[in-house]
Amino acid sequence: MPEMPEVEIIRRYLDTALTGQKIMKLDLLLPRQIKWPEPEAYRAMSIGRTIQGMDRRGKYLIMKLDNGNELIFHLRMTGRLVFEPNGVPHDTYARLLFYLDGGGVLVYGDTRTLGAVYALAPGERWRIHSLAEMGPEPLSREFTPEYLYHLVQGKGTRIKTLLLNQKYIGGIGNIYDDEALFLAGIHPERRASTLTREECQRLYGTINSVIEAGIRDGGTTFRDYQNGEGGQGGHQEHLFVYNRKGQPCRKCGTPIEKTTVGGRGTHYCPRCQT
């Protein structure tokens, strides 16, 4: 699933490529991927509107239109949003096509159709509960060591699971969760409430650093993720534990192990993480 770094990379490219262009035509090849409103109402809220820019909240991509409406995309596991400047869509699994007055086409593709697309009027983000209730993001002013320390107080859940809860911290997914815990030297099955203030300070730093590294490396691609130009990321070449089961730890040489925490595949070093 594209996580915060991947979605941010898509946002940055599309913000540059699309801002100022008008949506002239919309092909709804799979209307059921539109979760709100009805397909024809979605069409009416989109066509003829000029794109003011691309925003992001957690893993949601937000296209801002000139009348205040927002087109929101949640890519989930296999979704992608790619701009084809020559106006020719190449995605076999294209579901929505936005034809722009500059001659290009924005393609929303989704292999397994697990993603979700919305059009919201101003003030309607409450319709998407996970968006409206999302916690502070890494790299934001609201996300601080003190916030993290107070968050873990009294929480009996495992720290791995807590970090994935978008209500508490927006944007962290499975890959960067595993990486941050490894670099902080914290076992993913530790109860959140057992973390000390010093460990929270360290974890705060590693969360921010892995998100920054993911963005710097163009995101992580194992199978489906594509950036806004249709290219792949390179961060998979620099991961410490994720998807490295049985391979030697880059710090101590101990084989990386894999377990399941909260229903999610979890990679860790049994020696470096306590």
Image: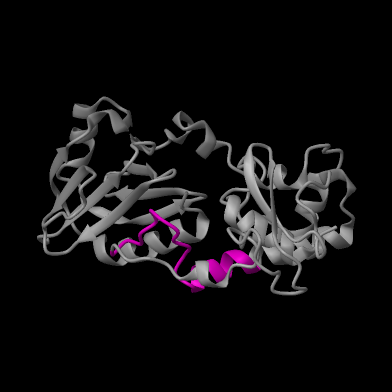
* Colour basis: one colour
Task: Say which quadrant the C terminus sits in.
Answer: bottom right
The residue at the point 75 percent across, 50 percent down is: 188
Q: Residue 222: give x, y in percent of width and height.
A: 45, 59
Q: Residue 235: give x, y in percent of width and height.
A: 51, 69
263 left or right, relative to 4? right
Q: Residue 196: give x, y in percent of width and height.
A: 90, 55
Q: Main secondary structure of the magenta part?
A: loop
221 left or right, relative to 148? left
91 left or right, relative to 265? left
259 left or right, relative to 226? right
**Magenta region: which residues?**
209-229
Examine the rendered structure and indicate whether residue 258 appears above or below residue 154.
Answer: below
Examine the rendered structure and indicate whether residue 199 appears above or below residue 108.
Answer: below
Magenta run includes residue 236: no
- The answer to whether residue 225 is seen in the rendering is yes
The residue at the point 30 percent across, 33 percent down is: 33
Magenta run includes residue 218: yes
Q: Residue 74: give x, y in percent of width and height.
A: 41, 43
